[in-house]
Amino acid sequence: MSQSQAQKKQEQDAYKKLAQKHQPKPPLLKNVIMAFLVGGAISAVGQAFINYFAARGMPPDKAGAPAAIVMVFLGALLTGLGVYDSIAKVGGAGAAVPITGYANSIVATAMEFKREGWIMGMSARMFQIAGPVIVYAVVSGVVVGLIRWFLAGVQ
Amino acid sequence: MSYLIAFVVGGLICAIGQVILDRTKLTPGHVMVIMVVSGAILAGFGLYQPLVKFAGAGAAIPVSNFGYVIVEGVLRELKMQGAFGALTGVFELAGSVIAASIFFGFIFAAFFRPKS
C-alpha cells in the first residue's frame, strides 16, 4: 500500500519535472530590453522637464520635484485615456517602475472600483497598489534616516 | 547629453525591475515596493544622491527616488529639530508627489471610464 503510494508520488514528481521543462519560459532578454527602452524613454521625458524648469531659473536639484509632478500628471492622464495600459503591455517593468507607473496604479484601480461607489469604491481602492508603496517608503525612510542619524550623524 | 544619461540609467533601473518580474512570481506592485526600499537603503549609505546628481531624471523618475527623498527629508529635519524630525521630515520632499498623485488620480479616475 505505502509502497504503491510512494511509487505514485515518484511518478507525480517526475511528471511535474517534465511539465516544468516544457513550460514556456518568459522571453527574459526581450522583456528586459523592452523594459530598458520604455523605462529609459520615460526617464528621458522626465529629463526634458527637469531641463525646462532648470532653464527657467530653478536650481537643478530643485527642478526634480516639479518634473515629478508633471510626470505624475501625464501618467494619470494617459491611464485615464487607456494609453498607459498599452505602454505597460510593451514595457513591463519599464512602465511600472517610473513614477508614471505609480500614478497609473492609482488611476487604474480607482477607475475600476468607481462602480462600487465614490468613497468606499474609488477612493478606498485607489491605494490598492500605491498604498503599500507609500507604507514601505515611509517605514524604510524613517528607519534608514534614524540609523544614519545615530551612527554617522548628519552632515 | 543629459538625456542620454537619463535614458541609460533610468532604463537600467527598469531592466533590474523586469528581471525581478520575470525570474520570480512577484507582481509589479512588489517590484515597486522593492524599488522604494532599495532607494531608501541606498540613500542611507549616501549612494543615491550622487546617482541623482549624475543621472538626473534617470534616478529621479524611477520610484526608487521616492525612498531617497523620504530619507533626505527625514535627515534634514533630524538635523534641524532632533528626534521628532524622523516623522516631521517624512513628507517634506515626498509630499508633493503624493499630493499630486492623489489629486490628479481622483480627477482623472472621476472623469474617465475603464476601457475594457
Image: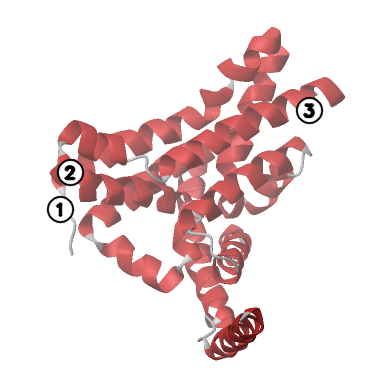
Quarter of the figure that contains the N terminus of chain B: bottom right
What amino acid is labelled 1 in the image? Arg
The picture quadrant where one finds residue A25 is bottom right
Farthest right residue in view: A152
Q: Which amino acid does label 3 sit on?
A: Arg
Q: What residue type is labelled 2?
A: Lys
Please name the residue that numbered disc 1 is placed on: B113
Q: Between residue B69 and residue A52, name the one nearer to us.
A: B69
Q: Tell me the crowding category of disc 3: few under 14, some 14 to 19, or many 20 or more residues within 10 angstroms, Cα based.
A: some
Q: Which of marks 2 and 3 is nearer the N terminus?
A: 2
Host chain of mark 2: A
How many numbered marks does the figure carry?
A: 3
Say whether marks 2 and 1 touch (CB < 8 Å): yes
Question: Tag on residue A148?
Answer: 3
In this view, the residue in front, A103 or B10, is A103
Q: x%, y% of residue A92?
A: 46, 67
Res. A63 in view: no
Rendered residue at 78%/22% (across/down): A149
Going by the image, does B28 lie left or right of A33? left
Element at badge 2?
Answer: helix
Q: Position of residue B36 (x, y in %)?
A: 58, 44
Image height of B94 relative to B17, above or below: above
CA gap, disc 2 and disc 1: 9 Å
Q: Nearer the viewer, mark 2 or mark 3?
A: 2
Residue for point 44% across, 30% down: B96
Q: Would you name the residue on which mark 2 appears?
A: A114
- Residue at 57% x, 79% y is A28
Disc 1 element: loop
